[in-house]
Protein backbone atom coordinates (compact mmCIF):
# COMPACT_ATOMS: atom_id res chain seq x y z
CA UNK A 1 0.00 0.00 0.00
CA UNK A 2 1.76 3.15 -1.17
CA UNK A 3 1.69 6.07 1.22
CA UNK A 4 3.43 9.38 1.48
CA UNK A 5 4.00 11.86 4.20
CA UNK A 6 2.83 15.48 4.25
CA UNK A 7 6.30 16.60 3.22
CA UNK A 8 6.05 14.55 0.08
CA UNK A 9 2.71 16.03 -0.90
CA UNK A 10 3.11 17.49 -4.35
CA UNK A 11 1.00 20.28 -5.63
CA UNK A 12 0.20 21.62 -9.04
CA UNK A 13 -1.95 24.49 -10.17
CA UNK A 14 -3.18 22.77 -13.28
CA UNK A 15 -6.87 22.97 -14.12
CA UNK A 16 -6.54 19.28 -14.90
CA UNK A 17 -6.99 19.09 -11.16
CA UNK A 18 -10.59 18.41 -12.00
CA UNK A 19 -9.82 14.96 -13.41
CA UNK A 20 -8.57 13.82 -9.98
CA UNK A 21 -6.94 10.50 -10.82
CA UNK A 22 -5.06 8.64 -8.10
CA UNK A 23 -1.72 7.20 -8.93
CA UNK A 24 -1.99 4.08 -6.88
CA UNK A 25 -4.50 1.77 -5.43
CA UNK A 26 -4.86 1.45 -1.68
CA UNK A 27 -7.18 -0.64 0.35
CA UNK A 28 -8.58 0.86 3.52
CA UNK A 29 -11.19 -0.90 5.64
CA UNK A 30 -12.72 2.35 6.87
CA UNK A 31 -13.13 5.41 4.65
CA UNK A 32 -14.58 8.76 5.63
CA UNK A 33 -15.73 10.99 2.80
CA UNK A 34 -16.35 14.65 3.69
CA UNK A 35 -16.27 17.90 1.76
CA UNK A 36 -13.37 19.05 3.90
CA UNK A 37 -10.23 17.05 4.58
CA UNK A 38 -9.42 16.41 8.25
CA UNK A 39 -6.50 18.88 8.18
CA UNK A 40 -6.17 22.62 7.60
CA UNK A 41 -3.29 24.34 5.91
CA UNK A 42 -1.26 26.54 8.25
CA UNK A 43 1.55 29.02 7.67
CA UNK A 44 4.82 28.15 9.45
CA UNK A 45 6.92 30.93 11.01
CA UNK A 46 9.55 30.47 8.24
CA UNK A 47 6.96 31.28 5.58
CA UNK A 48 6.44 27.68 4.42
CA UNK A 49 3.09 25.96 4.77
CA UNK A 50 2.18 22.85 6.65
CA UNK A 51 -0.89 21.00 7.89
CA UNK A 52 -2.67 20.90 11.21
CA UNK A 53 -5.34 18.43 12.25
CA UNK A 54 -8.77 20.12 12.23
CA UNK A 55 -9.94 20.84 15.76
CA UNK A 56 -13.58 19.78 15.10
CA UNK A 57 -15.38 17.03 16.97
CA UNK A 58 -15.87 14.87 13.88
CA UNK A 59 -12.13 14.51 13.30
CA UNK A 60 -11.52 13.94 17.01
CA UNK A 61 -14.14 11.22 17.14
CA UNK A 62 -13.03 9.43 14.01
CA UNK A 63 -9.24 9.67 14.35
CA UNK A 64 -8.92 6.78 16.86
CA UNK A 65 -11.28 4.63 14.78
CA UNK A 66 -9.16 5.40 11.73
CA UNK A 67 -6.00 4.47 13.55
CA UNK A 68 -7.38 1.14 14.79
CA UNK A 69 -9.09 0.08 11.57
CA UNK A 70 -6.68 1.28 8.88
CA UNK A 71 -8.81 4.17 7.75
CA UNK A 72 -8.52 6.86 5.12
CA UNK A 73 -10.12 10.30 4.81
CA UNK A 74 -11.25 11.59 1.42
CA UNK A 75 -11.95 15.34 1.20
CA UNK A 76 -11.20 18.70 -0.38
CA UNK A 77 -8.12 20.43 1.00
CA UNK A 78 -9.63 23.91 0.73
CA UNK A 79 -7.70 25.48 -2.17
CA UNK A 80 -8.92 25.83 -5.75
CA UNK A 81 -7.05 24.64 -8.84
CA UNK A 82 -4.54 22.57 -6.94
CA UNK A 83 -3.95 18.82 -7.08
CA UNK A 84 -2.27 17.12 -4.14
CA UNK A 85 -1.10 13.56 -3.92
CA UNK A 86 -2.37 11.46 -1.00
CA UNK A 87 -0.34 12.01 2.17
CA UNK A 88 -0.24 11.06 5.84
CA UNK A 89 -0.55 13.54 8.67
CA UNK A 90 -1.33 13.23 12.40
CA UNK A 91 -1.77 9.50 11.95
CA UNK A 92 -4.41 10.02 9.25
CA UNK A 93 -4.22 8.80 5.63
CA UNK A 94 -5.48 11.74 3.62
CA UNK A 95 -6.78 11.65 0.06
CA UNK A 96 -7.29 15.19 -1.25
CA UNK A 97 -9.99 15.75 -3.87
CA UNK A 98 -9.25 18.66 -6.20
CA UNK A 99 -11.77 21.38 -7.11
CA UNK A 100 -11.32 23.96 -9.84
CA UNK A 101 -12.05 27.63 -9.18
CA UNK A 102 -15.27 27.30 -11.18
CA UNK A 103 -16.31 24.26 -9.13
CA UNK A 104 -15.71 26.12 -5.87
CA UNK A 105 -18.09 28.75 -7.22
CA UNK A 106 -20.76 26.41 -8.59
CA UNK A 107 -20.60 23.38 -6.32
CA UNK A 108 -19.41 24.77 -2.95
CA UNK A 109 -20.55 28.41 -2.85
CA UNK A 110 -23.36 27.72 -5.31
CA UNK A 111 -25.33 24.51 -4.90
CA UNK A 112 -24.10 23.53 -1.42
CA UNK A 113 -24.24 26.94 0.23
CA UNK A 114 -26.51 29.01 -2.04
CA UNK A 115 -29.17 26.32 -2.66
CA UNK A 116 -29.10 23.50 -0.10
CA UNK A 117 -27.95 25.39 3.00
CA UNK A 118 -30.77 28.00 2.93
CA UNK A 119 -33.37 25.45 1.77
CA UNK A 120 -32.47 23.03 4.57
CA UNK A 121 -32.54 25.86 7.13
CA UNK A 122 -36.18 26.85 6.73
CA UNK A 123 -35.44 29.24 3.83
CA UNK A 124 -34.26 31.91 6.32
CA UNK A 125 -32.39 33.24 3.27
CA UNK A 126 -33.72 32.70 -0.25
CA UNK A 127 -32.34 29.56 -1.92
CA UNK A 128 -31.16 30.04 -5.49
CA UNK A 129 -31.85 27.34 -8.05
CA UNK A 130 -29.46 27.15 -11.00
CA UNK A 131 -29.14 24.16 -13.28
CA UNK A 132 -25.43 24.67 -13.87
CA UNK A 133 -24.86 24.66 -10.09
CA UNK A 134 -26.53 21.28 -9.83
CA UNK A 135 -24.53 19.96 -12.75
CA UNK A 136 -21.32 20.95 -10.91
CA UNK A 137 -22.66 19.33 -7.71
CA UNK A 138 -23.32 16.09 -9.58
CA UNK A 139 -19.89 16.18 -11.22
CA UNK A 140 -18.04 16.88 -7.96
CA UNK A 141 -20.06 14.27 -6.05
CA UNK A 142 -19.04 11.75 -8.70
CA UNK A 143 -15.39 12.69 -8.18
CA UNK A 144 -15.69 12.08 -4.43
CA UNK A 145 -17.48 8.76 -5.06
CA UNK A 146 -14.74 7.64 -7.46
CA UNK A 147 -12.03 8.63 -5.00
CA UNK A 148 -13.75 6.64 -2.23
CA UNK A 149 -14.27 3.67 -4.59
CA UNK A 150 -10.54 3.62 -5.33
CA UNK A 151 -9.32 3.62 -1.75
CA UNK A 152 -11.89 1.31 -0.10
CA UNK A 153 -10.85 -2.29 0.43
CA UNK A 154 -13.16 -5.20 -0.41
CA UNK A 155 -16.18 -5.03 1.94
CA UNK A 156 -14.96 -1.78 3.56
CA UNK A 157 -17.15 0.59 5.53
CA UNK A 158 -17.49 4.03 3.92
CA UNK A 159 -18.99 6.87 5.92
CA UNK A 160 -20.12 9.87 3.83
CA UNK A 161 -20.65 13.18 5.64
CA UNK A 162 -23.13 15.98 5.13
CA UNK A 163 -25.24 17.87 2.62
CA UNK A 164 -22.39 18.67 0.22
CA UNK A 165 -22.21 14.98 -0.76
CA UNK A 166 -25.78 13.68 -0.89
CA UNK A 167 -25.36 11.98 -4.28
CA UNK A 168 -22.23 10.08 -3.24
CA UNK A 169 -23.91 7.07 -1.54
CA UNK A 170 -25.78 5.98 -4.68
CA UNK A 171 -22.84 6.71 -7.00
CA UNK A 172 -20.53 4.74 -4.74
CA UNK A 173 -22.95 1.82 -4.52
CA UNK A 174 -22.96 1.59 -8.31
CA UNK A 175 -19.17 1.61 -8.44
CA UNK A 176 -18.62 -0.63 -5.43
CA UNK A 177 -21.65 -2.79 -4.51
CA UNK A 178 -19.47 -4.69 -2.01
CA UNK A 179 -18.95 -1.81 0.45
CA UNK A 180 -21.15 -0.87 3.41
CA UNK A 181 -22.23 2.76 3.16
CA UNK A 182 -23.27 5.13 5.93
CA UNK A 183 -24.34 8.75 5.50
CA UNK A 184 -24.72 11.40 8.18
CA UNK A 185 -26.50 14.71 7.61
CA UNK A 186 -25.05 17.27 10.01
CA UNK A 187 -27.65 19.91 9.17
CA UNK A 188 -31.46 19.76 9.41
CA UNK A 189 -33.49 17.89 6.82
CA UNK A 190 -36.32 20.22 5.77
CA UNK A 191 -40.05 19.54 6.05
CA UNK A 192 -41.44 17.92 2.86
CA UNK A 193 -43.23 21.14 1.81
CA UNK A 194 -39.93 23.03 1.65
CA UNK A 195 -37.89 20.15 0.26
CA UNK A 196 -40.45 19.91 -2.54
CA UNK A 197 -39.15 23.21 -3.92
CA UNK A 198 -35.87 21.60 -4.93
CA UNK A 199 -35.93 20.95 -8.69
CA UNK A 200 -33.58 17.95 -8.15
CA UNK A 201 -35.44 16.49 -5.17
CA UNK A 202 -35.73 12.96 -6.62
CA UNK A 203 -32.04 12.84 -7.47
CA UNK A 204 -31.14 13.88 -3.93
CA UNK A 205 -33.45 11.32 -2.30
CA UNK A 206 -32.15 8.54 -4.51
CA UNK A 207 -28.58 9.65 -3.90
CA UNK A 208 -29.07 9.35 -0.14
CA UNK A 209 -30.91 6.05 -0.42
CA UNK A 210 -27.73 4.51 -1.81
CA UNK A 211 -26.59 4.33 1.82
CA UNK A 212 -27.40 1.42 4.14
CA UNK A 213 -27.83 3.78 7.08
CA UNK A 214 -28.79 7.46 6.84
CA UNK A 215 -28.27 9.36 10.09
CA UNK A 216 -29.87 12.65 11.11
CA UNK A 217 -29.51 14.96 14.09
CA UNK A 218 -33.13 14.96 15.28
CA UNK A 219 -36.06 12.56 15.09
CA UNK A 220 -37.92 15.29 13.21
CA UNK A 221 -35.21 15.36 10.51
CA UNK A 222 -35.43 11.58 10.06
CA UNK A 223 -39.23 11.85 9.86
CA UNK A 224 -39.01 14.67 7.29
CA UNK A 225 -36.74 12.53 5.15
CA UNK A 226 -38.99 9.48 5.43
CA UNK A 227 -42.04 11.55 4.48
CA UNK A 228 -40.25 12.99 1.46
CA UNK A 229 -39.30 9.45 0.35
CA UNK A 230 -42.85 8.22 0.87
CA UNK A 231 -44.47 11.20 -0.87
CA UNK A 232 -42.10 11.55 -3.80
CA UNK A 233 -40.90 8.00 -4.45
CA UNK A 234 -43.77 6.01 -2.92
CA UNK A 235 -41.41 3.51 -1.21
CA UNK A 236 -42.70 1.30 1.59
CA UNK A 237 -41.37 2.31 5.02
CA UNK A 238 -41.74 0.52 8.34
CA UNK A 239 -40.02 1.42 11.64
CA UNK A 240 -37.29 3.54 10.03
CA UNK A 241 -36.63 0.84 7.40
CA UNK A 242 -37.05 2.01 3.81
CA UNK A 243 -37.62 -0.68 1.19
CA UNK A 244 -35.69 0.51 -1.86
CA UNK A 245 -36.68 -1.31 -5.09
CA UNK A 246 -33.71 -2.95 -6.81
CA UNK A 247 -34.81 -2.65 -10.41
CA UNK A 248 -34.77 1.16 -10.59
CA UNK A 249 -31.78 2.74 -12.23
CA UNK A 250 -31.35 5.55 -9.73
CA UNK A 251 -28.91 7.60 -11.69
CA UNK A 252 -30.59 7.45 -15.07
CA UNK A 253 -31.82 10.91 -15.95
CA UNK A 254 -35.34 11.47 -17.26
CA UNK A 255 -35.63 11.19 -21.06
CA UNK A 256 -36.55 14.89 -21.00
CA UNK A 257 -33.45 15.74 -18.95
CA UNK A 258 -33.51 17.18 -15.43
CA UNK A 259 -34.68 15.31 -12.36
CA UNK A 260 -35.53 11.63 -12.95
CA UNK A 261 -39.04 10.61 -11.92
CA UNK A 262 -40.83 13.93 -11.67
CA UNK A 263 -44.15 14.19 -9.86
CA UNK A 264 -45.31 11.98 -7.03
CA UNK A 265 -45.19 8.22 -7.16
CA UNK A 266 -48.06 5.92 -6.14
CA UNK A 267 -47.47 4.84 -2.56
CA UNK A 268 -46.45 1.25 -1.93
CA UNK A 269 -48.71 -0.02 0.84
CA UNK A 270 -47.23 -3.40 1.71
CA UNK A 271 -43.81 -5.05 1.98
CA UNK A 272 -42.57 -5.62 -1.58
CA UNK A 273 -41.82 -9.13 -2.85
CA UNK A 274 -38.73 -10.69 -1.26
CA UNK A 275 -35.65 -10.20 -3.43
CA UNK A 276 -37.02 -7.09 -5.19
CA UNK A 277 -35.66 -4.57 -2.71
CA UNK A 278 -32.83 -3.68 -0.34
CA UNK A 279 -33.39 -1.97 3.00
CA UNK A 280 -31.97 1.43 3.96
CA UNK A 281 -32.49 2.69 7.48
CA UNK A 282 -33.07 6.38 8.33
CA UNK A 283 -32.88 7.44 11.96
CA UNK A 284 -31.57 10.05 14.39
CA UNK A 285 -28.07 9.93 15.93
CA UNK A 286 -27.58 13.29 17.68
CA UNK A 287 -23.94 14.32 17.43
CA UNK A 288 -21.97 15.60 20.41
CA UNK A 289 -18.55 16.95 21.38
CA UNK A 290 -15.21 15.71 22.67
CA UNK A 291 -16.35 16.27 26.24
CA UNK A 292 -13.16 15.00 27.93
CA UNK A 293 -11.02 17.45 25.98
CA UNK A 294 -13.21 20.43 26.93
CA UNK A 295 -13.30 19.36 30.59
CA UNK A 296 -9.54 18.90 30.60
CA UNK A 297 -9.02 22.41 29.21
CA UNK A 298 -11.54 23.85 31.66
CA UNK A 299 -9.37 22.45 34.49
CA UNK A 300 -6.14 23.88 33.11
CA UNK A 301 -4.85 26.62 35.43
CA UNK A 302 -3.56 28.65 32.45
CA UNK A 303 -7.01 28.67 30.89
CA UNK A 304 -8.69 29.49 34.21
CA UNK A 305 -6.29 32.42 34.58
CA UNK A 306 -7.03 33.53 31.02
CA UNK A 307 -10.78 33.52 31.84
CA UNK A 308 -10.15 35.83 34.80
CA UNK A 309 -8.04 38.05 32.55
CA UNK A 310 -10.86 38.28 29.98
CA UNK A 311 -13.30 39.35 32.72
CA UNK A 312 -10.86 41.95 33.98
CA UNK A 313 -10.21 43.30 30.49
CA UNK A 314 -13.94 43.79 30.06
CA UNK A 315 -14.01 45.78 33.31
CA UNK A 316 -15.35 42.99 35.52
CA UNK A 317 -19.02 43.39 34.59
CA UNK A 318 -21.59 41.55 36.72
CA UNK A 319 -22.91 39.68 33.70
CA UNK A 320 -21.02 38.64 30.61
CA UNK A 321 -23.29 37.39 27.84
CA UNK A 322 -21.48 35.34 25.21
CA UNK A 323 -22.35 34.46 21.62
CA UNK A 324 -20.06 32.20 19.58
CA UNK A 325 -21.06 31.50 16.01
CA UNK A 326 -19.89 31.19 12.46
CA UNK A 327 -21.08 34.44 10.90
CA UNK A 328 -24.16 32.80 9.39
CA UNK A 329 -27.75 34.04 8.96
CA UNK A 330 -29.06 30.85 10.56
CA UNK A 331 -27.52 31.75 13.93
CA UNK A 332 -29.96 34.50 14.94
CA UNK A 333 -27.18 36.99 15.74
CA UNK A 334 -29.40 39.94 14.70
CA UNK A 335 -32.24 38.76 16.95
CA UNK A 336 -29.81 38.49 19.88
CA UNK A 337 -28.51 42.00 19.28
CA UNK A 338 -31.98 43.42 18.94
CA UNK A 339 -33.01 41.93 22.29
CA UNK A 340 -29.83 43.20 23.95
CA UNK A 341 -30.22 46.69 22.46
CA UNK A 342 -33.81 46.91 23.71
CA UNK A 343 -32.75 45.79 27.20
CA UNK A 344 -30.18 48.61 27.24
CA UNK A 345 -32.82 51.07 25.99
CA UNK A 346 -35.37 49.89 28.59
CA UNK A 347 -32.76 50.22 31.32
CA UNK A 348 -33.19 46.55 32.25
CA UNK A 349 -29.43 46.16 31.58
CA UNK A 350 -26.73 48.79 31.97
CA UNK A 351 -23.35 48.96 30.23
CA UNK A 352 -20.71 48.36 32.85
CA UNK A 353 -22.95 45.85 34.64
CA UNK A 354 -23.47 43.88 31.45
CA UNK A 355 -21.39 43.19 28.37
CA UNK A 356 -22.11 41.08 25.30
CA UNK A 357 -19.11 39.33 23.78
CA UNK A 358 -19.90 38.22 20.25
CA UNK A 359 -17.40 35.99 18.46
CA UNK A 360 -18.37 35.78 14.79
CA UNK A 361 -15.96 33.55 12.92
CA UNK A 362 -15.55 34.35 9.23
CA UNK A 363 -17.47 31.95 7.00
CA UNK A 364 -18.26 31.46 3.28
CA UNK A 365 -17.16 34.96 2.45
CA UNK A 366 -17.61 34.38 -1.27
CA UNK A 367 -21.41 33.98 -0.88
CA UNK A 368 -23.45 37.20 -1.26
CA UNK A 369 -25.91 36.52 1.59
CA UNK A 370 -22.95 36.14 4.00
CA UNK A 371 -21.42 39.42 2.84
CA UNK A 372 -24.77 41.19 3.36
CA UNK A 373 -25.15 39.68 6.83
CA UNK A 374 -21.69 40.85 7.84
CA UNK A 375 -22.46 44.41 6.75
CA UNK A 376 -25.72 44.37 8.65
CA UNK A 377 -24.22 42.95 11.87
CA UNK A 378 -21.31 45.36 11.83
CA UNK A 379 -23.63 48.32 11.27
CA UNK A 380 -25.75 47.17 14.22
CA UNK A 381 -22.74 46.70 16.51
CA UNK A 382 -21.46 50.16 15.58
CA UNK A 383 -24.86 51.71 16.27
CA UNK A 384 -25.33 49.99 19.64
CA UNK A 385 -21.80 50.72 20.81
CA UNK A 386 -22.02 54.30 19.57
CA UNK A 387 -25.12 54.84 21.61
CA UNK A 388 -24.36 52.93 24.81
CA UNK A 389 -20.57 52.65 25.27
CA UNK A 390 -18.95 54.65 28.04
CA UNK A 391 -15.28 55.68 28.13
CA UNK A 392 -14.49 52.67 30.28
CA UNK A 393 -16.94 50.03 29.06
CA UNK A 394 -18.30 48.63 25.86
CA UNK A 395 -21.80 47.31 25.21
CA UNK A 396 -20.72 44.72 22.64
CA UNK A 397 -17.23 43.35 22.19
CA UNK A 398 -17.48 42.08 18.62
CA UNK A 399 -14.68 39.88 17.24
CA UNK A 400 -14.69 38.73 13.62
CA UNK A 401 -12.09 36.00 14.12
CA UNK A 402 -11.69 32.29 14.68
CA UNK A 403 -9.99 31.25 17.91
CA UNK A 404 -8.23 28.09 19.04
CA UNK A 405 -10.17 25.82 21.38
CA UNK A 406 -8.09 26.96 24.39
CA UNK A 407 -9.32 30.54 23.98
CA UNK A 408 -12.88 29.31 23.43
CA UNK A 409 -12.83 27.41 26.70
CA UNK A 410 -11.47 30.50 28.50
CA UNK A 411 -14.41 32.44 27.07
CA UNK A 412 -16.87 29.76 28.21
CA UNK A 413 -15.40 30.00 31.71
CA UNK A 414 -15.58 33.79 31.66
CA UNK A 415 -19.21 33.96 30.48
CA UNK A 416 -22.13 34.00 32.92
CA UNK A 417 -24.70 33.49 30.20
CA UNK A 418 -24.28 31.68 26.89
CA UNK A 419 -26.68 32.88 24.18
CA UNK A 420 -27.56 30.35 21.46
CA UNK A 421 -30.37 31.97 19.50
CA UNK A 422 -30.19 30.09 16.18
CA UNK A 423 -33.25 30.33 13.95
CA UNK A 424 -32.46 26.80 12.75
CA UNK A 425 -29.42 24.67 13.56
CA UNK A 426 -28.77 20.97 12.95
CA UNK A 427 -27.28 20.55 16.43
CA UNK A 428 -25.21 23.51 17.80
CA UNK A 429 -22.11 22.14 19.45
CA UNK A 430 -21.23 25.46 21.09
CA UNK A 431 -24.15 24.92 23.49
CA UNK A 432 -22.73 21.53 24.47
CA UNK A 433 -19.19 22.87 24.81
CA UNK A 434 -20.36 25.62 27.14
CA UNK A 435 -22.09 23.06 29.36
CA UNK A 436 -19.04 20.77 29.36
CA UNK A 437 -16.77 23.66 30.35
CA UNK A 438 -18.93 24.76 33.33
CA UNK A 439 -17.42 22.30 35.79
CA UNK A 440 -18.15 24.60 38.69
CA UNK A 441 -21.85 24.04 37.98
CA UNK A 442 -22.82 27.68 37.52
CA UNK A 443 -23.58 29.61 34.32
CA UNK A 444 -26.79 29.74 32.33
CA UNK A 445 -27.50 28.48 28.84
CA UNK A 446 -30.17 30.34 26.87
CA UNK A 447 -30.98 27.98 24.01
CA UNK A 448 -33.14 28.25 20.93
CA UNK A 449 -35.71 25.51 20.60
CA UNK A 450 -34.85 25.43 16.87
CA UNK A 451 -31.51 23.73 17.50
CA UNK A 452 -30.95 19.98 17.59
CA UNK A 453 -29.30 20.49 20.98
CA UNK A 454 -32.65 21.59 22.42
CA UNK A 455 -33.88 17.98 22.15
CA UNK A 456 -31.25 16.90 24.65
CA UNK A 457 -30.56 20.01 26.75
CA UNK A 458 -34.04 20.33 28.21
CA UNK A 459 -32.88 22.17 31.36
CA UNK A 460 -31.55 25.16 29.41
CA UNK A 461 -33.67 28.30 29.29
CA UNK A 462 -35.39 27.38 26.04
CA UNK A 463 -36.54 30.24 23.86
CA UNK A 464 -38.12 31.06 20.53
CA UNK A 465 -35.63 33.59 19.08
CA UNK A 466 -38.34 35.15 16.90
CA UNK A 467 -40.15 36.20 20.08
CA UNK A 468 -37.98 39.17 21.07
CA UNK A 469 -39.92 39.78 24.30
CA UNK A 470 -39.41 36.18 25.39
CA UNK A 471 -35.74 36.37 24.50
CA UNK A 472 -35.37 39.61 26.51
CA UNK A 473 -37.17 38.07 29.49
CA UNK A 474 -34.89 35.00 29.38
CA UNK A 475 -31.78 37.17 29.21
CA UNK A 476 -32.92 39.07 32.30
CA UNK A 477 -33.85 35.82 34.06
CA UNK A 478 -30.42 34.42 33.21
CA UNK A 479 -28.65 37.52 34.53
CA UNK A 480 -30.58 37.46 37.81
CA UNK A 481 -31.06 33.74 38.32
CA UNK A 482 -30.96 32.27 41.81
CA UNK A 483 -27.55 30.52 41.97
CA UNK A 484 -29.10 27.32 43.36
CA UNK A 485 -31.57 27.17 40.47
CA UNK A 486 -28.71 27.75 37.98
CA UNK A 487 -26.68 24.93 39.57
CA UNK A 488 -29.62 22.54 39.48
CA UNK A 489 -30.12 23.17 35.78
CA UNK A 490 -26.41 22.99 34.95
CA UNK A 491 -26.03 19.69 36.84
CA UNK A 492 -28.72 18.11 34.74
CA UNK A 493 -27.29 19.56 31.49
CA UNK A 494 -23.83 18.31 32.37
CA UNK A 495 -25.10 14.80 33.05
CA UNK A 496 -26.41 14.71 29.48
CA UNK A 497 -23.26 16.09 27.83
CA UNK A 498 -20.83 14.03 29.89
CA UNK A 499 -22.63 10.76 29.16
CA UNK A 500 -23.13 11.42 25.41
CA UNK A 501 -19.84 12.41 23.84
CA UNK A 502 -18.90 12.38 20.17
CA UNK A 503 -16.99 9.11 20.54
CA UNK A 504 -20.19 7.42 21.70
CA UNK A 505 -22.05 9.01 18.78
CA UNK A 506 -19.59 7.57 16.24
CA UNK A 507 -19.60 4.14 17.90
CA UNK A 508 -23.40 3.96 17.96
CA UNK A 509 -23.67 4.96 14.31
CA UNK A 510 -21.01 2.49 13.16
CA UNK A 511 -22.44 -0.29 15.32
CA UNK A 512 -25.87 0.21 13.74
CA UNK A 513 -24.28 0.30 10.29
CA UNK A 514 -22.59 -3.03 10.96
CA UNK A 515 -25.95 -4.52 11.98
CA UNK A 516 -27.71 -3.34 8.79
C1 LIG B 1 -21.51 23.23 9.12
C2 LIG B 1 -21.61 22.07 8.15
C3 LIG B 1 -20.24 21.49 7.85
C4 LIG B 1 -19.29 22.59 7.43
C5 LIG B 1 -19.22 23.68 8.49
C6 LIG B 1 -18.31 24.84 8.11
O1 LIG B 1 -21.19 22.78 10.39
O2 LIG B 1 -22.48 21.09 8.64
O3 LIG B 1 -20.32 20.51 6.83
O4 LIG B 1 -18.00 22.07 7.17
O5 LIG B 1 -20.53 24.18 8.69
O6 LIG B 1 -18.67 25.36 6.87
P1 LIG B 1 -17.66 25.36 5.62
O7 LIG B 1 -18.52 25.79 4.47
O8 LIG B 1 -16.59 26.34 5.98
O9 LIG B 1 -17.11 23.97 5.45
Image (spheres, grey):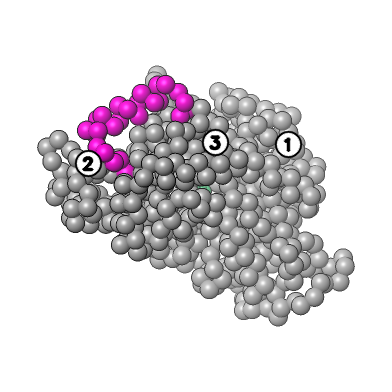
Q: Residue at x 19, y 56 (%)?
A: 346
Estimate the x, y position of residue 282 in percent, counting from the top left.
Answer: 68, 59
Q: Which residues are magenta?
A: 297-323
Task: Determine which residue is flagged by label 2.
Answer: 353
* CA distance for labels 1 and 2: 57 Å
Which tag is nearer the camera, tag 3 or tag 2? 2
Q: Secondary structure at mark 3?
A: helix
**Residue lying farthest to the right in this orientation:** 274
* Residue 213 vertical position relative to residue 301 in the rendered view, above or below: below
Q: Residue at x 41, y 42 (%)?
A: 484
Asked if disc 3 and disc 2 are in contact, CB closer than 8 Å, the reply is no
Estimate the x, y position of residue 115 in percent, counting from the top left.
Answer: 47, 62
Asked where in the image residue 173 lies, by quadrant, the reply is bottom right
Does the rendering let one see residue 331?
no
Asked where in the image residue 2 lies, by quadrant, the reply is top right
Q: Residue at x 19, y 40 (%)?
A: 352
Estimate the x, y position of residue 143 in percent, counting from the top left.
Answer: 62, 49
Q: Is residue 19 left or right of residue 270?
A: left
* CA distance for labels 3 and 1: 29 Å
Q: Is residue 481 left or right of residue 439?
A: left
* Residue 230 vertical position relative to residue 80 in the rendered view, above or below: below
Task: Determine which residue is flagged by label 3.
Answer: 291
Task: Determine which residue is flagged by label 1.
Answer: 28
Q: Is residue 203 left or right of residue 405?
A: right
Does the rendering let one see residue 221?
yes
Local crowd at mark 3 within 10 Å, few (<14), some, or many (≥20)?
many
Estimate the x, y position of residue 203 in percent, counting from the top left.
Answer: 62, 65
Amino acid sequence: MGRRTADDAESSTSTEAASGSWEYQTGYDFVVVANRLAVNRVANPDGSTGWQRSPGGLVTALAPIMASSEGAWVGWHGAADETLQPFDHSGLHLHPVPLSEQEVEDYYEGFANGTLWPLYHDVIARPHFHRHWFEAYRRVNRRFAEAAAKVASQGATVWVQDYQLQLVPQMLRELRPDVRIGFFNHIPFPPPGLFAQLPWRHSVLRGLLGADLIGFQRDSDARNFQRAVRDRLGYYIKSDQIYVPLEENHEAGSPLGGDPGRGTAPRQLSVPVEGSYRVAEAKAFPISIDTDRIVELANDPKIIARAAQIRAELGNPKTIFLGVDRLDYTKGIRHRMKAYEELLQDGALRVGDACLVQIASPSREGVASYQELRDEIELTVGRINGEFDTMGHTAIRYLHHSYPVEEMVALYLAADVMLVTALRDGMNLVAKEYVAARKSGDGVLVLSEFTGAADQLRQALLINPHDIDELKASMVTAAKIDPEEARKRMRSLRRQVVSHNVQRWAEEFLQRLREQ
